[in-house]
């Protein structure tokens, strides 16, 4: 392995690490040499991820955390810090999504969907998505920053979405939360650049995960989405982990304030 990509001796904390993108990132960080604490609301899932990290010869701890609660996030960072001896890499990946029209619509949409067009976004749904996707990342950055500032080093990776730059109908809450996360990444990068802290983001395009399995299992919708990707195919979640290794490693020391889109070229067409 090139020494610039080696994470030996580094400690990472990954939220939403029980399934999908978060789990893939956590495992590849461990492969690159990092010890990894994984957190999520469902403990048995992150416990399984932690076991897989242990099998790679790395230290790990599973933490049950709801990132929309700042108190729980503070406790998560404190426990991970105590167990691993400090946090060098923070990956804010925890997120939720649910498509819905902003207000009830008189007619169903022209394409197949998995929600009721007669029900709009409630206050509870709006706040749940915003508090998990945006506030949760803010809480994580705020909680881990003091130790990184003291060391004058650290890597923060916010997992955004292609939806931070490409609007989709019926996803007002999700798209707004991811657009906000992109701007938070830029602001914190500017604030902390003088102290050796890099803040970047990954903007995944369409990936098949547990969160989106219903739409991908639909053959018609699957083919329609793939047809809109310039590379005409999906890729493996591992690719997101490899990009995270770059952003977590010394190889990216000169990069900060960026959102890197891994989407098969989709954002190049539409942005």
Image: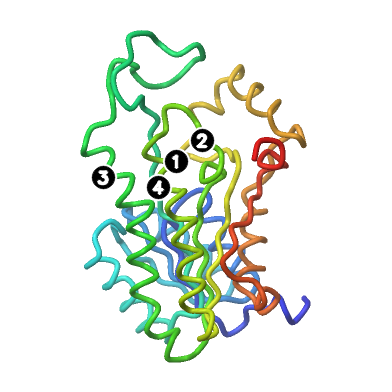
Residue position marked by numbered label 3 in the rendering: 127
Residue placed most toward the observer, 1 or 163: 163
CA–CA distance in space, label 4 to label 2: 12 Å
Q: Is residue 202 above or below residue 58?
A: above
Which of the 4 image quarters holds residue 150?
bottom left
Q: CA distance from mark 3 to mark 4?
A: 10 Å
Asked if residue 155 is positioned above or below residue 200 in the image, the reply reads below
Q: Are marks 4 and 2 in contact (CB under 8 Å)?
A: no
Q: Nearer the viewer, mark 2 or mark 3?
A: 2
Going from N to C along the chain, the mark reached first, 1 or 3, is 3
Question: Which residue is label 4 attached to?
Answer: 177
Of residues 135 and 63, the one nearer the viewer is 135
Circles 2 and 3: CB distance less than 8 Å? no
Q: Position of residue 91 (x, y in %)?
A: 48, 65
Task: State if disc 1 and disc 2 touch (CB < 8 Å).
Answer: yes
Report the number of discs.
4
Front residue of 25/269: it is 269
Which residue is situated farthest in the top direction here?
107
Residue 176 found in image quarter:
top left
Which residue is label 1 attached to?
A: 175
Residues marked 1 and 4 touching at CB (< 8 Å): yes
Residue appearing at x 37%, y 8% in the figure: 107
CA distance for labels 2 and 3:
19 Å
Q: Secondary structure at mark 3?
A: helix
Could you tell me if the residues under marks 1 and 3 are in contact, i.e. CB atoms within 8 Å? no
Residue assigned mark 2: 167
Disc 1 element: helix
At label 3, counting other C-alpha atoms closer than 10 Å, the crowd grade (few under 14, some 14-19, many 20 or more) is: some
Of the two numbered discs 4 and 2 on the same chain, state the one appearing first in sequence.
Answer: 2
């Amino acid at each position: 392995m090139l020494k610039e990509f080696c994470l030996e001796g580094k400690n990472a904390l990954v939220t939403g690490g029980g399934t999908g993108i978060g789990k893939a990132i956590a495992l590849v960080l461990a492969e690159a040499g990092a010890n990894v604490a994984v957190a999520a609301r469902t403990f048995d899932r992150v416990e399984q991820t932690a076991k897989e990290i242990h099998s790679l010869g790395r230290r790990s701890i599973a933490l049950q955390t709801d990132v929309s609660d700042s108190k729980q996030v503070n406790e998560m960072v404190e426990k991970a810090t105590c167990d691993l001896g400090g946090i060098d890499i923070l990956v804010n990946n925890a997120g939720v999504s649910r498509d819905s029209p902003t207000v009830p619509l008189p007619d169903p949409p022209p394409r197949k969907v998995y929600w009721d067009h007669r029900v709009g976004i409630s206050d509870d749904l709006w706040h749940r998505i915003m508090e998990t996707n945006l506030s949760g990342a803010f809480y994580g950055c705020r909680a881990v920053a003091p130790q990184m500032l003291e060391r004058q080093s650290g890597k923060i990776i916010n997992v955004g979405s292609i939806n931070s730059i490409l609007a989709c109908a019926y996803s007002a809450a999700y798209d707004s939360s991811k657009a906000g996360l992109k701007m938070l990444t830029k602001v914190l990068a500017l604030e902390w650049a003088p102290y050796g802290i890099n803040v970047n983001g990954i903007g995944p395009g369409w990936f098949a995960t547990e969160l989106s399995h219903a739409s991908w299992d639909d053959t018609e919708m699957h083919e329609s989405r793939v047809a809109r990707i310039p590379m005409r195919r999906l890729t493996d979640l591992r690719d997101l982990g490899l990009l995270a290794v770059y952003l977590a490693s010394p190889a990216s020391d000169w990069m900060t304030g960026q959102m890197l889109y891994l989407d098969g070229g989709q954002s190049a067409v539409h942005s």
